[in-house]
């Protein structure tokens, strides 16, 4: 019989662009998502959890193609159907809104949270699986739906721990831009291409600055590498009108709206957009959401190409150190807007919808940057094992602590080397280790080793002082839980 | 220019075998998972969230094959690598335990909860995406690790709302069966095939009953369709020894262990298995987990082929109506055991591990069957819109309710038809609708329509009585929140 060929060992690795999350990272995200869900629910939004897998046909944006059907998504063929992992939460919502259109309430407020997958080149901090957390209202054309989402977004940020003053929700409107484009001479089907160039140019305002965008609005722009990007061919006056739109924010909402009214001239769609902004501002103002929380700001340019009416963005305004070491404001953590063609692909019917998506990982990073998590997520109290025949006693200690809601565990490795047990407790981030050998057991006491205090003393004191103040106390077994509770504060 | 061909509309459908979860279904599962995580964390287990996607190489069980690499899993090729959706939580744990072996604490207690995917034929109640919720201890050979998991499982079931007495955790041991097989004359490499037949036969005890299994242990068995399954060829005495193992449970743990000691005769591995069961029983007994919660039961046969030491299963013992209408006990909701080859595939090193997996959907179904969810998850209070110019006032009412932690929303559809608004409130499961027209606004009052009470009165009373007791009251606007709070109880 031939000797079976030795198989090479498989590599223990995540696929490229994917990662694992451990302990506190998972718990913090989960607790943030719970808090967001609580606010969304209070506003009457209902949970929806679709499957991770959709047909490529239903996802839509990425059409099956003989060569490479899965551009941008992870897709595969299954019994003749192409299936794919969802790349966002909006495409599955569109499918659900069409599939259950006779059963769902209308308007339908829903929230969805979970991972999405993108088949894109991974990079530093860019992963191919990440969380999204969306809330959308389907079937309402009312500006009250948009205003509500902005208010809910502000409430949500405060609920997860962003202080008032550290964020602002900024609101813009695509229709106002459409009006400005009319005034700039870009109305009509013939100008669709040039309008596209303008939209893409405005979208780069953050990156290129006003001069770069001005070049793209005019003849075009040569970048640092020498590559030339064709411009929209606007004359100077028209380019200034467009740039004037993004810079139209004034000291108050009223003044901004007045400025926008000037800019859209007699464009009907422009006037409609200004009226929509005014209605949102009035609704929010009446509810007490002042400009310290939500502002009309035509400088919000992201997503203007995608959305059809109001557009909104939540920005965190506190400063962190940028990549160059200089302080910069933290930036955007959520965005959304109105899109009125949600289910049209499926049913042919226009259904108005508006919604927001919170960048869960960005928001977690913001809370981390604000130092919200330093004290949380201590490891468990570790009960060490001095005598392996007394495991039941040690388990009973851990159980007593747990019954008092204190995280606790017994060391389950080989107990022979006590140093390994303390190293283990250290690796676990244990605040306290409990020690009870034969002698302590006979005397009815335990040793409580305060590892956090010990580490602090070791850092602060000289060796001599430290020896005199060991962070270890003996206490009666019966007082163990009370003593530990006191130390954990 | 040729007219663009009209694309057929895509079908708005979940892929075959997948489903969507709405509202309360999502919230209930989430809240159950949170509660399970709370107990797991108290026991010192740390969260681990791996990506949904793994390399097929790391998943292991399903080897890439030219024709059909994705038997049982959803897999696809990506830049020359085969990727797949995880089919359970254990394979990713094995990969993580190998990949981070120098950084993780040892022993490593971890829990994981989330969806897994199986590329299997869907059936009624069988979906291709479902939740698992696992806890495992990697790197401990101690029976204290197994005992701890059994205790934690009992605590978890009680924490999610299964009453003591309505469940039992049953513990068995594969080594005891190995001992029994030795006594039955099936030791040695030559008998590996026959041992496999015995394991598969025992695994069918629930389905085939004792006589069916007896036939499979002996000459073989012809099923109802006439198909013949070859047996293990044991003589009657040996077959009775094996069956005696599965029926070895006695009135007390002590008696069961004595009976098992008889059955394994002088088999060393059998004696080791009995000693392991005795140690688990002693540890649990000392911690107060009596046979009302955890019992030694050699009748646990599921997973005996897979695990290498202790095997455990949680069964819900209360009765529900079976498919034939007759009461039957609810059955298994969790299972697990010890498997000592977790990371060997990757590193060549044996690492002992033990763990449990809770069937989240089964457990939710059990809680539903016990009527745990009837009162929960009421819809929001719906503020109707009588006058569309007063949206801000209606929004303020909803905001006030939310500030008192009452779920509330304003109707955002077209307000023209008031009947539609009440139909909407009904579809939302709203307990209460608020109505304030011009007249009420002028008088500073609101109408509170108690929809739940209305439905009850309509069911109980005649039309005449009902007209005299309308479930609608007027109250001062200022008392609105207090009045609603009173009615929601």
Image (tube, coloured by chain):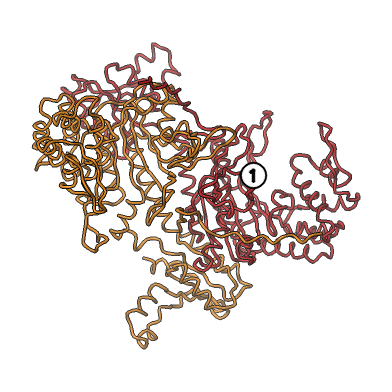
Chain colours: A orange, B red
**A165 left or right, relative to B215:** left
Residue B63 visible in the current orientation: yes
**B91 left or right, relative to A338:** right
Q: Residues within 10 Å of mark 1 (few under 14, many from 20)?
A: some
Question: Considering only vertical position in the picture, is B293 above or below B417?
Answer: below
Q: Position of residue A239 (x, y in %)?
A: 13, 38
Kindly identify the residue that appears in the image at 34 percent across and 31 percent down: B487
Label 1: which secondary element:
strand
Question: Considering only vertical position in the picture, is A380 above or below A228?
Answer: below
Q: Quadrant of the C terminus of chain A?
A: bottom left
Q: Position of residue A85 (x, y in %)?
A: 48, 41
Question: Which is nearer the eye, B312 or B328?
Answer: B312
Which quarter of the figure has residue B328? Answer: top right
Question: Which is nearer the eye, B95 or B322?
Answer: B95
The residue indicated by pointer 1 is B332
**A471 left or right, relative to B166:** left
Q: Residue furthest bottom?
A: A464
**B390 left or right, relative to A480:** left
Question: Considering only vertical position in the picture, is A446 above or below B294?
Answer: below
Kindly identify the residue that appears in the image at 11 percent across and 25 percent down: A266
Q: Quadrant of the N terminus of chain A?
A: bottom right
Q: Position of residue B103 (x, y in %)?
A: 49, 67
Q: Position of residue A208 (x, y in %)?
A: 21, 49
Q: Chain of mark 1?
A: B
Question: Which is nearer the eye, B435 or A196?
Answer: A196
Question: Considering only vertical position in the picture, is B41 above or below B465?
Answer: below
Which quarter of the figure has residue B259? Answer: bottom right
């Amino acid at each position: 019989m031939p000797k079976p060929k030795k198989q090479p060992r498989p590599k223990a690795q995540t696929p490229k662009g994917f990662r694992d999350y451990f302990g506190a990272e998972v718990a913090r995200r989960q607790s943030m998502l719970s808090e967001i869900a609580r606010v969304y629910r209070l506003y009457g939004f209902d949970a929806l959890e679709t499957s991770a897998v959709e047909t490529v046909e239903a996802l839509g944006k990425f059409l099956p193609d003989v060569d490479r059907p899965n551009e941008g998504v992870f897709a595969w063929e299954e019994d003749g159907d192409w299936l794919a992992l969802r790349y966002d939460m909006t495409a599955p919502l569109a499918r659900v809104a069409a599939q259950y259109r006779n059963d769902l309430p209308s308007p339908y407020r829903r929230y969805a949270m979970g991972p999405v997958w993108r088949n894109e080149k991974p990079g530093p901090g860019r992963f191919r699986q990440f969380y999204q957390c969306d809330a959308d209202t389907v079937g309402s054309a009312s500006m009250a739906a948009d205003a509500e989402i902005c208010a809910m977004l502000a409430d949500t940020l405060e609920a997860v721990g962003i202080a008032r003053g550290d964020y602002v929700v900024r609101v813009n409107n695509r229709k106002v831009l459409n009006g400005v484009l009319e005034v700039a001479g870009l109305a009509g089907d013939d100008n669709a291409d040039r309008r596209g160039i303008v939209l893409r140019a405005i979208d780069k305002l953050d990156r290129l600055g006003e001069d770069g965008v001005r070049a793209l609005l005019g003849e075009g722009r040569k970048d640092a590498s020498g590559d030339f990007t064709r411009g929209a061919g606007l004359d100077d006056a028209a380019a200034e009108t467009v740039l004037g739109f993004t810079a139209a924010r004034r000291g108050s909402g009223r003044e901004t709206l007045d400025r926008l009214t000037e800019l859209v001239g007699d464009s009907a769609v422009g006037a409609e957009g200004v009226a929509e902004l005014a209605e949102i501002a009035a609704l929010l103002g009446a509810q007490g959401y002042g400009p310290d929380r939500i502002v009309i700001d035509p400088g919000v340019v992201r997503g203007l190409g995608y959305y059809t009416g109001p557009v909104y963005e939540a920005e965190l305004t506190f400063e962190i150190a940028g990549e160059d070491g200089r302080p910069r404001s933290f930036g955007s953590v959520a965005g959304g807007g109105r899109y009125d063609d949600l289910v049209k692909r499926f049913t042919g019917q226009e259904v108005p919808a508006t919604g927001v998506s919170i960048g869960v990982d960005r928001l977690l990073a913001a809370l981390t940057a604000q130092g919200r998590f330093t004290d949380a997520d201590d490891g468990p109290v570790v009960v060490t094992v001095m005598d392996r025949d007394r495991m039941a006693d040690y388990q009973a200690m851990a159980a007593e602590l747990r019954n008092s809601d204190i995280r606790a565990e017994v060391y389950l490795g080989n107990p022979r080397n006590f140093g390994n047990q303390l190293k283990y407790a250290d690796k676990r981030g244990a605040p306290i280790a409990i020690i009870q050998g034969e002698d302590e057991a006979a005397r009815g006491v335990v040793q409580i080793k305060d590892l956090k205090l010990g580490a602090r003393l070791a850092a602060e004191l000289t060796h001599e002082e430290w020896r005199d103040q060991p962070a270890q106390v003996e206490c009666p077994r019966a007082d163990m839980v009370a003593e530990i509770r006191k130390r954990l504060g």
